[in-house]
Every structure is written in C-alpha cells, then in structure tokens.
Amino acid sequence: MHTHDTPLADPSVRRECRSLVLAGNPNTGKSVFFNFLTGIYVDVSNYPGTTIEVSRGRCGEMDVIDTPGVYGVSSFNDEERVARDIILEADVVLNVVDAVHLERDLFLTLQLIDMGIPMVVALNLMDEAKREGVSIDVDLLSDLLGVPVIPTVATRGEGLCQVQEAIASARPGHSDPQLLDRVHEVLREVGSRPEAVLVLEGDPVVSERHGVAPRELREEIYARRRMRVNDIVRHVVREESPRFSLSAALGRWTLHPVTGLVTLAAVLWVMYQFLGVFIAQTVVGYTEGELMQGYWEPWARATAARWFGDGSLAHTLLVGEFGVVTMTVTYLLGLLLPLVAGFYFSLSILEDSGYLPRLATLVDRFLTGLGLNGRAVVPIILGFGCITMATITTRLLGTVREKRIATAILNFTIPCSAQLGVITALLARAGGEMALAYVVVIGSCLVLVGTLLNRALPGESSPLLIDLPPMRLPRIENVLRKTVTRTYHFLREASGWFVLGSFVVVVMSVTGLLELWQSALSPMVVSWLQLPREAANAFVMGMVRRDFGAAGLAMMPLTAKQTLVALVTMTLFVPCIASVAILLKERGRREALIIWGASWILAFAVGGLVSQIVIR
Amino acid sequence: MTLDQVRKGSVVQILSIPGAEERAQLIRLGLGEGCRVRCAERLPLGPLVLRCHRQEVALGRNLARRIEVREESE
C-alpha cells in the first residue's frame, strides 16, 4: 500500500504521466467508456488482496484506470476500499453519471468535487432518461457543479468523442465552502486535499495511514451534501409522466409476491437446463470424455512411457491414476474450465440484467433465518458450480460471521456440479421417491447447519440494504468479458492447489496409505450405513474429488434405498482437496479443521440415520 | 410507527435510521432521514422495497423494524 505524502496542490511535483480514473455508481456504463478510451490493449487484474477486478489501459499519454462501481468514496466494503485508493491516486477523474438516477449519482459527484480532484462528468443513459420522462438542463448542471458535463448514450457511441475531448478541460468543481474551511485545518497534518476530506468524513483507513484521529463529521458532511444534491436536482431536472416501460413493468413483476416466485422458478429452471444439463453433461461429456480422456491422456501416457518405465515412480506421479499431468489437467481443463465459465457466464447475465439484486431480495427472508442476508445467494449459486470458487466469493459478504456461516453451508451441504451430474443420474435410476427423500434430507441439513451456526456464533449479521437497478438487456460483449476474466482469475488462483492436492493423493497411493484408510473405514460402511464393503473406496476417493466418489458409487450394484444412503453420505462428506486448500487460505487452520472434521461426523451420522430408518 | 408496518403503496417520511453505516448508505442512495418514500412492495415476512423518485432500494425486514417513520396523508 503506498501513500503519497506530496501535496497534490503543489503543481511542481505532478507526476509526468497523467492518470485518468473512471469513477461512478454501479450500472452506469463505465466499462463502455473505458473500452472506448483504451482500445483493446487492456490489463485486467485483481486488486492486491481482493477479488475485485481492476482494468488498466492507456489513452495517448494517459494511464486509464477503471474502478469498481461505488455509491461514495469510503471504506465500507472491498469495492469501496479499492475505488478509494485508485481515486486518491488520480490526476483527473471521469465521473460517469446515470441521468435517470441523478439524486443518487450526484452524491458521489459532489464528494469527488469536495475532494478537489479535476474532473469531467459524463451524463450517461440519456436515452433511458428520455423514456422515463426525465429532461435535464445540462448547461445549468455544468454551471452548478463547476465542471464540464457531457450528455452521452454510451452504448450507441453518442457523446464518447466529446467526452474524450473534454478531458483536457477537466477542472475542480464548486465544493462546499464550509467544508473547505475544515479541510484547511486538517491539510497540514494529512498533506493532500482528497485525503483530508476523507479524514474529516471519519474514514478509518486513511486516518490511520497518516497517523491522525478520524474526525467524526461524516453525518454532518453527508447531510449537507445530500441537501446540495437535492437542491441541484430540483433546479436541473424536469419530470414529465413516464411512458409505459417494459423494464419498469418487469422490475415490478420480479418482486411481486406471486409473479416474483414464478419468475424465480423460471430463472432457476433455465439455469438448471443451461448449467446442469447443457454444460455439466453435454459440454463436459465432450471436453472431459472425448478431448481429455480420449486424446490428451493417452498421448501423455505414451509420451511419458518413452522417458520413464511403465510402473516407475515418476510414471505414476505424472501419468498414473491420479497423475499430475493426466488427472489434474483433465480435471482443470476438461471439467472445471467449462463449469466455472458456465457459472460465471450465468452470474454475469444475472448481474447485468439487474436481476441479481432482485433475486437477493426474494431469498432474503429465507437466508435471514440462516444468519445470512440475500446477498449470500451469490456464493450459494456458485457453490452448485464449484465449492472452491464459491468459498472465494464469500469475501463479498459483510461480516466475518456471515463468511463463516456461508463457508460452512457450502462445504457441508452444497453438492458441486462435478457431483450433481452423477447424483442426478443415480437418483433418476433410484426413482422419484428416493430423489425427493434426498432433496429433503440435504435441504434439512442446510437449514440445520445455518440455523445452528446462527444461534451459536456471537454477534449479528448485517441486514439487506440493496439498490435495485432497472432491468436491462445485458450487453453480450460485457458478459463475455466478465466471464473470461473471472474464469481466468479463478483458474489461476486455484490450479496450484489442485496440483498440490493430486500430488498428496499420489503419495498416499504409492505409500499404501490410501488402502489403509479404505480398510479402516469399511466396518463403519458395512454395519452402520449398510452398504457394500467397496463403498468405502468411494468415500476415500470422495475426499480427493467429489465426483470420483459419486462416480465410484455409480459402478456398484446398489438397491434404490442404498443409493439414497450412499448419496446423502457422499454429499455431506468432506470437501475435496482443492476446497480444503482454499478453506485453509480463506478461513484459517482452525476453522478449516473444524469444518473438515465435522463433515465426517455429519455425513456418517445423517447417512447412518437414514439407513437405519429406510433399510431394515 | 416503524417501517415494517407500512402498507404497500403508502407514502411515509423517514424519521430515524439506526446504525451509522446504514444511515450513511441510505443517505447516499437518497433515502436519508427526513426523506419521503413510497413503499413499492412488501414481500411476505421478507424485505420491503422503497421508492423515492426513480430510485428503488430493498431493505431487510429486521432493518425495517428499527427504522422510525411517519405516515403522510396523500
């Protein structure tokens, strides 16, 4: 983390290369401006220590940096902390503003103006504003703010060139004179005006960096800023009665107590058809079965056999049953890559269409009972793709308490897509009654884990407080861009752990530890779960890769009732090795160990109970 | 009265919001104390959807229970 001690007010110490930072509320279309300004040579990377993506590019002599969408500059969550640090480094800010929601967006605009950063405002979504019956006096807005304001319809390319030209005439706007007096008092201690404003607003992180006490003036400053925003809006906005808009109607239907549930069911069905059937079965069947196991693995084995003898240690390590070159590569590219890409594709569509916050609102009531709020729907959806990916996403939850509960629910009860395919096939064979029983048992465990943790963990979870953006048709290039960058970052973060995991298993299998484990487990499997002895192998394999376990069960001659018992136990059983690695990283050794140990108990307790009830 | 008791479609004035962070977040979205909002939707036992100008915000029931409001005559 770098701080700059040089006051921005001193022109002699300006950096040579000017940096342009894009800032704005979520869903204002910033990325279109970014892409227009920078062209195709863009570097997208995760901001250090976060999952927040930051795009950087160049426009002539300028560095252009995009920031996550935020409603203000402060330190409430990861997005805000990242945006704050980038904005603090900015020479010029391009503030993209949603013309339909000026009351909301101008709050950030005035904050940036108070921070004294030279800026240009792009008044975007002018077409939507027109449809909504909102007309804006752009010249007056520019006069009142004291900075250039350019009306745009970014998706149609209107006004983009004018924005680029206006950047040269960026200037600091009219800030709150009363605030300015206070800024001067703090400026001596802090050194830069933007940071002085944040210290006055009580930002704990910025204050600590400068070793000064945060001033507790946020309430007062925000209230004044709100009044100024409302005053400006009153002067520049003229409203007529809006025409009928499909977007607004859709927005209402998706939240109505009856039609909302119908929409939810329809969305989930479409997602299941796309992810559970098309990606998990058709695409993975091709990539894993045909491409990897049909071409890659035989080729790798043949190549390895030329260098190392068949059965040698190196051969087993590289291309044996759990070989790093065979199993891990097949797993990563053949299975995980299509699944993770599919899940991120769906998530991006949900996000860009504006449905995700509505989904969070619909499920909030249910998740509140589990000590979470509606936002936790994101990691839970991703959990059905890959628990590893979902565990990383729990970072977006508000409190440590919520991260703990969500991580536990994911690792205990949610079957990942690798298993889901096999589970669906086995349940289809076992019949509708068993399928229903499976869903009821696993669902009850999910509720049980959440409810118990909610009772047991101290503190309080954060309440739902979410902005509902209008429903829009997602832009395909935006969805694809997000899918590609997120998939890439996930694979980069997780693949090392997958390699390590398979290495551990190879070592266990070579040293005979794997077999020892299997025989230790079998009495329990036979007498308590009432399954054939070989089912123990499936459970040991399940520790490595969940679908190995489930697939192992598919090979066995099980009765319908035994299938139910085996699948319940397998689903609740310990997370796969890659998930454990991420669990260690995200939640620490103690918590990871508790979750891992408790999965054994939960899986065998519930599995055994079901067995004792259904099998006589 | 508190916000969770508000009927769908009625307009209320927000009197007080507990919690500094919630207060800050709502004032940014334009729904601060003193603001007049319309209850656009109530999910049974679930969140409320508030509307102010064209801005819509969903609030969890537990939070709504702690927000003091006064009903406005239309």
Image (tube, coloured by chain):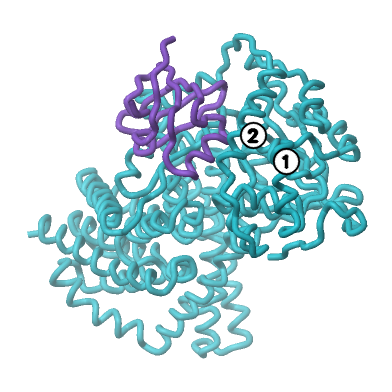
Chain colours: A cyan, B purple
First reached walking from the N terminus: tag 2 or tag 1: 1
Which residue is at a point 23% across and 43% down the rendered structure image?
Answer: A432
Q: From the image, tell me which residue sits under label 2.
A: A225
Viewer-proximal residue among A499 and A490: A490
Picture layout, residue B66 above or below residue A375: above
Picture layout, residue A306 above or below residue A158: below
> In the drawing, does residue A240 fall left or right of residue A404?
right
Residue A452 appears in the figure = yes
Local crowd at mark 1 within 10 Å, few (<14), some, or many (≥20)? many
Picture layout, residue A142 above or below residue A436: above
Q: Chain of mark 2?
A: A
Residue A521: image location, x then y, percent: 24, 77
Viewer-proximal residue among A153 and A1: A1
- Callout 2: helix, strand or loop? helix
Q: From the image, tell me which residue sits under label 1.
A: A114
- As drawn, the label of residue A389 is none
Residue A531: image location, x then y, percent: 19, 67
Which residue is at a point 51% across and 76% down the rendered structure image?
Answer: A500
Q: Residue furthest left?
A: A616
Local crowd at mark 2 within 10 Å, few (<14), some, or many (≥20)? many
Do dots 2 and 1 share one subunit?
A: yes
Residue A101: image location, x then y, percent: 63, 27
Q: Quadrant of the N terminus of chain A?
A: bottom right
Amino acid type of the residue that numbered disc 1 sits on in the rendered structure: Asp
Name the image quarter holding residue A511. bottom left
> In the drawing, does residue A441 fall left or right of residue A67?
left
Amino acid type of the residue that numbered disc 2 sits on in the rendered structure: Arg
- Callout 1: helix, strand or loop? helix
Q: Chain of mark 1?
A: A
Name the image quarter holding residue A480. top right
> In the drawing, does residue A100 fall left or right of residue A339?
right
- Mark 2 and mark 1 residues within 8 Å of each other at the beta carbon: yes
